[in-house]
Amino acid sequence: MFDFLGGTSPWVLVSLALALLFTLSFEFINGFHDTANAVATVIYTRTMSPYRAVMVSGMFNFLGVLFGGVGVAYAIVHLLPVELLINVDTGAFGLVMVFSLLTAAIAWNLGTWFFGIPASSSHTLIGAVLGVGLANALLNDLPIVHSINWQKAIDIGLSLIFSPMMGFVLAGAILFGLKRWRPNARMHRAPELRMELKNRKHPPFWNRLVLVLSAMAVSFVHGSNDGQKGIGLIMLVLICFLPAQFVLDLGSSAYQIESTREAAHYLKRLYEKHGNDLVAPVGEAATTTNASVASAASRTTPYRCEIAHTPATIQRLLANLKGLNDYTMLAADKRIEVRRDLLCLDDGAKQLGKLQMLAPREKSDLTRLRKDLTTTTEYSPIWVTLAIALALGLGTMVGWRRVVETVGERIGKQGMTYAQGMSAQITAALAIGAANLYSLPVSTTHILSSGVAGTMVANRSGLHGGTLKNIMLAWVLTFPISMLLAAGIFWLAVQFL
């Protein structure tokens, strides 16, 4: 399975091992940092014992990573502009980029966990990625508009903003429905707050069943969403250190390669029809950008995508793929070239799709075309998926104590009832599951916490101002702090390149 390591220099092996350790450490920390989001209600209500709850949660987190796909993974990766992505394989640059964002994310995650604040690993990682992109733009005198993939950032930002709101409203609505349906049921009573956890009574059977099933569902969707972020990071690491083996999926079938070829042919026809509407304005901007990069010695982006060069890029890609049925038949430098061309063409297709004069059918075709262009660059080897699943699953089994009490007792002025726990967990599972369908990263922490807050309002239990203030501060500060940390580390490291 690891034959690709043969002939690799000891320095590269050591650096690769360190980078993989950092990535797996982030995912391990993510596991215990977010564990309470899945187990807080079942532990607090004594639906399950703490250790049984975290074991089950760890197992379902593991399964979530295995079956979650890679859509969210590459949504995170593509926050970076295409110019950065096509240069991940250029030696020390990729190393600096990955270590900068991982160091920042790990530092903030550990800090918030230590103080028992339900902060978001998703916000932290996304902020770190944005920080690297912005720092790269400042170092190269690039316009801020070219620093990150703003459209992707806006899409993800909206999902991170509206998902907690959805959690607040939906959880409150579910609880309201339960109170109307069974107003006097025992599920609306809070556990005995002053009693030790081990001496509290179990919830009623049906409440207990729903709490257990919803906790499993939250753990599964958490694994499928958050686990993919680690997969994306590991793929960046592997492309950085071993580009010849990982820039393309060497296990791609002849059909997948043929689909990529056909997509390039179709893009060529579309470009010949509509390309003139893109070349003039983008070409002028590109000239200015290239001059700025040259003045900065292009320290971090030696290769760039230009929309005006799309015909030449298509021709080069088709020449490399002509008669090819197996990527292993390509030379190492040609694999790197093919990946760069595919990423540039995908970016060009995205720009083309914004033209108003395109017919609806052409826009639909472009969406499918982009999937065919990236099918052999957006992938994950099974051992990568297993490694991330194991790190997240093991991390889930530790560290739960610091946040369970916060979620159970300190968000509302009264303790959480069984019905409130059910409502919050069902909401979290539905919201994160919906985000997975659209390959959008969301915060399990904030969805569940806002869901609990929504049930407190619906139950007229009141909200604990101090805890909410800490959660909101963590929510507001996570982005800027993780961005500044990652940007600062990246800037310092680039000075030594």
Image: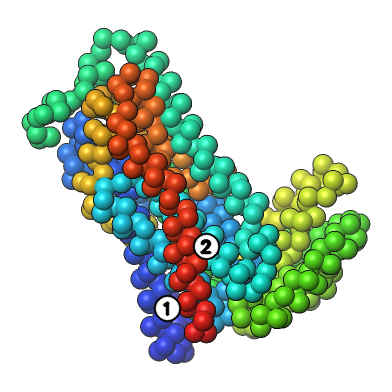
Where residue 261 appears, as percent x and y from the top left, is: 75, 65
Q: In which quarter of the image is the N terminus?
A: bottom left
Q: In this orientation, which residue lies closer to the viewer: 69 or 360?
A: 360
| SS for dot 1 | helix
| Badge number at residue 131 | 2
Three-letter code for the amino acid on which mark 2 is drawn = Gly
- Residue 480 in the image: above or below residue 3: above
- Residue 368 in the image: above or below residue 271: above
Where residue 42 appears, as percent x and y from the top left, is: 25, 34
Locate residue 77: give its quadrant: bottom right
Q: What residue is disc 1 on?
A: 16
Q: In this orientation, which residue lies closer to the viewer: 381 or 329?
A: 381
| Residue 342 left/right relative to 221 | right
Q: In this orientation, which residue lies closer to the viewer: 359 or 100?
A: 100
Which residue is pictured at 35% across the width and 39% down the height? 469
Q: Nearer the viewer, mark 1 or mark 2?
A: 2
Where residue 131 appears, as percent x and y from the top left, is: 52, 62
Q: How far, Cα to Cα, is label 1 from label 2? A: 23 Å
Three-letter code for the amino acid on which mark 1 is drawn = Leu
| Residue 53 left/right relative to 483 | left
